[in-house]
Image (cartoon, grey):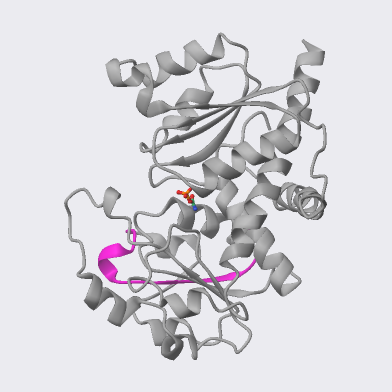
Amino acid sequence: HRHLLGIEALRPEEINTLLDLADSYAALNRQPDKHADALKGLTQINMFFENSTRTQASFEIAGKRLGADVMNMAMQASSVKKGETLIDTALTLNAMHPDLLVVRHPQSGAVDLLAQKVNCAVLNAGDGRHEHPTQALLDALTIRRAKGRLHRLSIAICGDIAHSRVARSNIMLLGKMENRIRLIGPPTLMPAGISEFGVEVFNDMNEGLKDVDVVMMLRLQKERMDGGFIPSEREYYHRFGLDADKLSNAKPDAIIMHPGPMNRGVEIDGTLADDINRSVIQDQVEMGVAVRMAAMDLLSQNLRLTRGAE
Ligand code: CP
């Protein structure tokens, strides 16, 4: 592949190849010297048109550990504020010969559009409610390391599914790897026609969490609710927030995941989030760096091959 725009285009064997490479980078990241030279001589530009802590920091660290020259565009201070369009901004940066563009944008499809206009590799760091492929890949690596496999697991994705690019990418990835996926949340936060994706849908946490291996919680994404129905946080926590009582329905060794940012006391009890025997939330962050190193390494190999052939 020339770009990493979504999980949709990836085959299971390609996902496994990427996760294997990410596993080796996870080992490197625990060494005193964390450097490799897979991106040596290459230029990486991070363009985040939407807020981020984990994704932006880990893409920057990943690029630097692999030897790239990394530049973070401060989009809030850029000429976008003077009315320059996304495409004109991308073309301007493209003229500076970057090799890797990492893009987050509030509109679904914006990153795909941008990828058609530039001649470097583009990585989608989250576009609207469409896809967040590196998040699904880091979640997959976290599950594989915790459970020893990434197939035939029962996985519950809970909360605001309708507005979540994380849920969408995870449903595709975990489905491709032949897992059983349960979606749990209020009907108002469930996308229309979702059962066509081969998932089971529940509106009750106790029922949906029965005997699952993995519990993945999601934040209420109010920024994408377009003035529509926003549930009361108190009521939401009561019915859909993960607490010890609801978790007791899952398998005794079920792991707790959350992509972050997390709202304690809204979708998850803070004590559970911090429980190192159950929660792998910090492992997800750690795997984020390794997966992004692997993704940029593989794309840069393709880039060098394509350029060599031109
Ligand atoms: N999970 C995730 O994408 O977090 P950020 O928005 O902080 O990057």
List x then y, in percent, for residue 119: 61, 16
Q: Residue at x 37, y 65 (%)?
A: 263
Q: Residue at x 60, y 56 (%)?
A: 285
- Residue pushed farthest front? 32
Magenta stretch, residue numbers: 176-192
Say if 7 sits above or below 139 in the image: above
Please tell me how many numbered marks the rendered image carries: 0
Say if 253 sits above or below 298 in the image: below
Say if 176 sits above or below 118 in the image: below
List x then y, in percent, for residue 164: 40, 54
Most foreground residue, 96 or 270: 270
List x then y, in percent, for residue 53: 48, 47
Q: Is residue 191 magenta?
A: yes
Q: Is residue 10 magenta?
A: no
**Split into 4 quadrants, where in the image is the C terminus?**
top right
Q: Quadrant of residue 140?
A: bottom right
Most foreground residue, 145 or 65: 65
